[in-house]
Image (cartoon, helix red, strand yellow):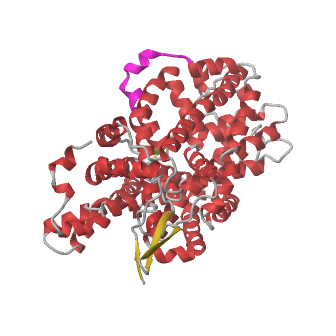
Amino acid sequence: MSSVVAPEKPASNTMGPKEVELILVKEQNGVQFTSTTLVAPTPNQTNPSGEEERETWGKKIDFLLSVIGFAVDLANVWRFPYLCYKNGGGAFLVPYLFFMVIAGMPLFYMELALGQYNREGAAGVWKICPIFKGVGFTVILISLYVGFYYNVIISWALFYLFSSFTGELPWVHCNNTWNSPNCSDWADNSSVSDIYKATPAQEYFDRAVLHIQDSRGIDDLGRPRWQLTSCLAVVIVLLYFSLWKGVKTSGKVVWITATMPYVVLTVLLLRGVTLPGAIDGIKAYLSVDFLRLCDAKVWIEAATQICFSLGVGFGVLIAFSSYNKFSNNCYRDAIITSSINSLTSFFSGFVVFSFLGYMSYKHNVPLDKVARDGAGLVFVIYPEAIATLPGSSIWAVIFFIMLLTLGIDSAMGGMESVITGLIDEFKFLHKHREVFTLFIVAATFLISLFCVTNGGMYVFTLLDYFAAGTSILFGVLIEAIGIAWFYGVDRFSDDIEEMIGQRPGRYWRLCWKFVSPCFLLFMVVVSFATFNPPHYGSYMFPPWANMVGWCLAMSSMSMVPLYAIYKLCSLPGKFCDRLAYAITPESEHHLVDNGEVRQFTLHHWLVV
């Protein structure tokens, strides 16, 4: 008797991992007998990395809500509406949508596809071009740095939430122990432009929450304040128990944190449009001034908003998509989630400006006297508007719950980027995810304590200015160059086709190879050219503080050249051989041994 095994025949649908048919042929006494068996794919067939099966999201909606929850954050509420208002109203949407289409969506799509195909965190994905792994550590560091101060914003929201459970909101009058002689109610303030006057809401934020009056500057921080420290500790505990078990737990948390803001925004809009002056505020938000499009600053601000609003460059999209099934349609996900993010920004403008219009009407002042962006909008102007409503405590609770949920899922995304990026790079950490997660959030808590001191706002401002400004633009630029030019936009397109059965069109490939890198290079140059030292109000930071800020920014950006040097020095052979290994995917190093280096051919650099 003899037997042979016929070659495996792939199933008819080759997209993604499928069962294969094993045909066994036996011959006995000149007669052949055949039998067939369906064999499940091995781990190597499941994903191209050859690693053991990776944890995946419980449901597809868990992934979508996680991405939306991360991308839709506080900046959607406190920055975009104000930018739209001061830059031509509806006309601002022209440059915003233009940059969204040529850079925002392509980069968003690129990161989702990169993570899903390679099924690794921000550092591990660069096995496709090892010399660029430094950019993975760059984005991990940026996410870590942002966590140092972003969690503090959530702790402020929690502080306000606790303060709202009172009969009368504490930022209504000037007769509190923390108020200064300069405190003046809107109704009693005959000169609202008087810089020496401050509203009760402004003094509550500055003097009751921050206690900034007890600090002379960044060199006089004082001790952490127990009230904010307690709120920060609660935030850290929430983050830990949302992340400690991976996407199986975080994917369920976002069902609340990602959807709650939409419910609250809708409720606030329904209340806001019933207020006197609300329609005037909305008209001011939407008023179209196309002449503003002739101002280069408008285009730069639109480009900047796109760069930071979608969440590209933090490693979060890579980390989240790495837990997708290999055949997941990441193209559709990119279009849906990036569009929802932009629509949310636009929608929140109606909510914000309905209340700003009401404040303008109530105090009989021009809208630009009450309109502002940043923390001042959500912690001063909006609380002040809410305080004038019947049932103000209830509205305050609703509003600050929204801020809390907006912040929590964005903070979860940043921490997941750090955790996934490092445990995928250092495999021994996989078995100790719970302990490692505790270490990361505890370290974040300890550093964040500097931001809850009397002078903590100065530390917060410095971190906010330097942690994720130019450095994140630089990181995404290097990322785009590494994928589109060194790995190859054609090979990257092949990877996407292997996953979803559809090759990216020429438009996407042109954006990845030419348009997006040029856009990012322009933004990096503009960022350096328009740099102004940070300040908080009238306080200017001393030179040493600016140096610390630049060291922080450079510490993340320096990962790119430092790792490239390390990689070239650690490889054997002559320089050309080392370079060949460093720019060739790890799975193709055997081709380098045969002298077949794709990047050493002209075709590689010209193909689109």
Across and down, in percent, residue 111 comes to: 43, 50
Would residue 216 be seen by someone viewing this image from the given angle? yes
Residue located farthest toward the bottom when viewing the structure as drawn: 1
Say if 264 sits above or below 490 in the image.
above
Residue numbers of the magenta segment: 287-300
Across and down, in percent, residue 275 comes to: 76, 23
- The quadrant of the picture occupied by the C terminus is top left
Relative depth, front residue between 556 and 477: 477
Secondary structure mostly taken by the magenta-highlighted segment of the chain: helix
In the image, 118: left or right of 589? right
Relative depth, front residue between 187 and 74: 74
- The quadrant of the picture occupied by the N terminus is bottom left
Residue at image x 33%, y 60%?
128
Relative depth, front residue between 115 and 446: 115
Residue at image x 21%, y 49%?
604
Across and down, in percent, residue 158 comes to: 70, 52
